[in-house]
Amino acid sequence: MRYIEPHGHMVSRTTDDYQDMVTAGCAAVCEPAFWAGFDRSSVDGFHDYFCQLTDYEPKRAAKFGLPHFSWLCINPKESEDVALATDVIGLIPKFLDRPNVLGIGEIGLNKNSRNEMKVLEMHVDLAARNEQLILVHTPHLEDKLKGTRLILDVLRSDKRIRPERCIIDHVEEHTIQLVLDAGFWAGMTLYPESKCSPARAVDMLDLYSHERIWMNSACDWGVCIPLAVPRTALEMKRRGWPADLIDKVIYRNPIQFLSQCPKFKLP
Ligand SMILES: [Zn+2]
């Protein structure tokens, strides 16, 4: 088996996780900027985090033979403070030329607040001005449908944004069609406890589409399974999916999307 982990918060994971992923066939990992489990107290905290994502973590991954890519932003959970967000967004351009940076993400909404919307629009403008790919986090639980609609409206109202260059992550049964119909890519995030289980993800693949879709494990600092993608591939196999189609969803699809950034290259 070969697969891409297109959304993994590796700074939270151990070296054992890296070893397990590579052993299972992981060919590349992509790490969006995220909440650290606590609010950073200043713009300097983000500067150090962006250095970690673009310098230290790719070196750590390389020790296990795994190419590491990253996405940069201030995440929605910390974007309530618009002044701080403005400063953090001002930092990002000088990191965009780093060799492992693929785009702006994971931006989006958490509580669908007015300030989050403002910061989302600032990120979309930053991506458009710098011709960057976009990776979007959609809110969890009851805020998801409303938040997904708001996010799609923001992206569609900016004429510089091409939907095929944006992935809307954490889709569920009630949002996946909305995202695909509008021409965007959809990401399914696999969780061990709540939200999208491997069985639910394969149900969605059966029901909707295997085009413009990827799966990821998120694998952040909470309860996560870094091997969720290959485990879901086993569930697809158990249900009789042909090997070529499994390979498309877990390997060729993410490569198709990510290769829109010329810096995404596998050895
Ligand atoms: Zn994430």
Image: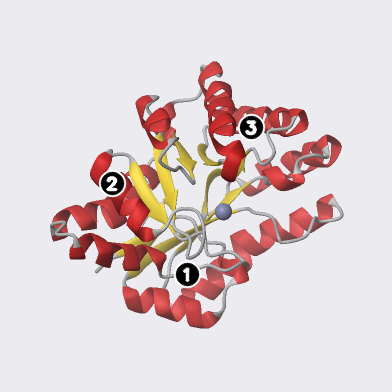
Q: Which element type, helix, strand or loop, lies under badge 2?
A: helix
Nearer-N-terminus badge (1/3): 3
Of marks 3 and 2, the one in the foreground: 2
Q: Where's the N terminus, which quadrant?
A: bottom left
Q: Could you say which is closer to the camera, residue 162 or residue 249?
A: 249
Return the mark for residue 205: 2
Return the mark for residue 155: none
Q: Is residue 252 left or right of residue 189?
A: left
- Check if mark 1's residue and mark 3's residue have beta carbons within 8 Å: no
Q: Residues within 10 Å of mark 3 (few under 14, many from 20)?
A: some
List the residue tagged with mark 1: 225
What x and y, as percent, mark residue 54? 60, 59
What x and y, as percent, mark residue 49? 71, 59
Nearer-N-terminus badge (1/2): 2
Real-space Cα separation, disc 3 to disc 2, in angstroms: 32 Å
List the residue tagged with mark 3: 126
Of marks 1 and 3, the one in the foreground: 1
Tell me what residue is drawn at x 66 percent, y 32 percent.
120
Q: Is residue 152 left or right of residue 265?
A: right
Q: Could you say which is closer to the camera, residue 89 or residue 253?
A: 253
Q: Could you say which is closer to the camera, residue 180 or residue 158?
A: 180
Amino acid type at circle 3 is Leu
Q: Could you say which is closer to the camera, residue 212 or residue 51?
A: 212
Q: Is residue 107 left or right of residue 182?
A: right
181 over 185 or under it: above or below? above
Tell me what residue is drawn at x 68 percent, y 60 percent.
51
Amino acid type at circle 1 is Ile
What x and y, as percent, mark residue 90? 75, 39
